[in-house]
Amino acid sequence: MDKIKILVVDDESRMRKLVKDFLEREGFIVLEAGDGMEAMEVFYEEKDIALIILDVMMPKMDGWQVCREVRQSSAVPIIMLTARSEERDELQGFDLGIDEYISKPFSPKILVARVEAVLRRTHGVDAASVVDAGGIEIDKSAHMVSIDGKEIELSFKEFELLAYFAENQGIALSREKILNNVWNYDYFGDARTIDTHVKKLRSKLGDKGNYIKTIWGMGYKFEVE
């Protein structure tokens, strides 16, 4: 496989160097940007960026603005870094289509592990893997979902959640199990992270959103009617 390219966006040069050193040690190509405007310039110039690591608080153009602009044209995975740990910031991030959310200070080894987990899901899928669930067709290699032949737009994390549900039809899944499998690490945040994603996913699936059943006090079950 060609070397994977990652864009690191942070106005603190020491933070960029720290993240870059750890990622390059694992064989990634790392591009840097010191503010949001520079990040967008790099993003538009480099068409094959596989993942963005993005700081929230930056001059000229903050991380939220960068994420909104990127999401207008791309579903590239985004890991958001922030010095703030307020719950509403985290939920806002997921609403904007952010895939992972890490509060500073953090262990660089943990960041690398999460980067690798996201990239395994985007680059390590079976090319022949197509799942059909009651009229919902999930093409894991192309990262595409269609309902009754019509393609729908899902964020990276919504896609992963739907694929996990479809592969575990009829099985009651706790929130903890969903977090550990879809987010691929032990997540210590609020379970409402999942509820937020399920609500948006149901909405995008239309009538077929009813396939996702709520099991009160526990989690969810995907069941084709």
Image (tube, rainbow, N blue to C red):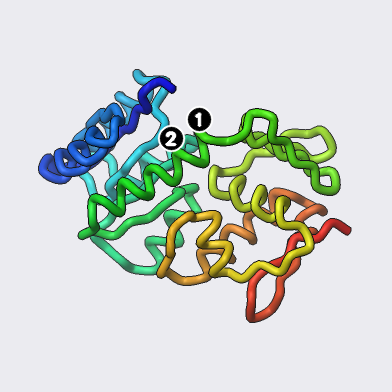
Residue at 64%, 77% in the rendered image:
218
Tell me: residue 219, above or below residue 68.
below
Determine the residue located farthest toward the bottom in the rendered image: 217
Residue at 26%, 30% in the rendered image:
30
Residue 22 visible in the shown view: yes
* Quarter assignment of residue 209: bottom right
Determine the residue located farthest toward the right in the rendered image: 225
- The label number, if any, that marks residue 73 in the structure image: 1
Q: Is 58 or 51 nearer to us in this picture?
A: 51
Residue 20, percent from left and from top: 21, 37
Q: Secondary structure at mark 1?
A: loop
Tags 2 and 1 in contact by the CB under 8 Å rule? yes
Mark 2 Cα shell of 10 Å, populated few (<14), some (14-19), many (≥20) = some
Tell me: 99 left or right of 147: left
**Image quadrant containing the C terminus:** bottom right
**Image quadrant containing the N terminus:** top left
Residue hosting label 2: 70
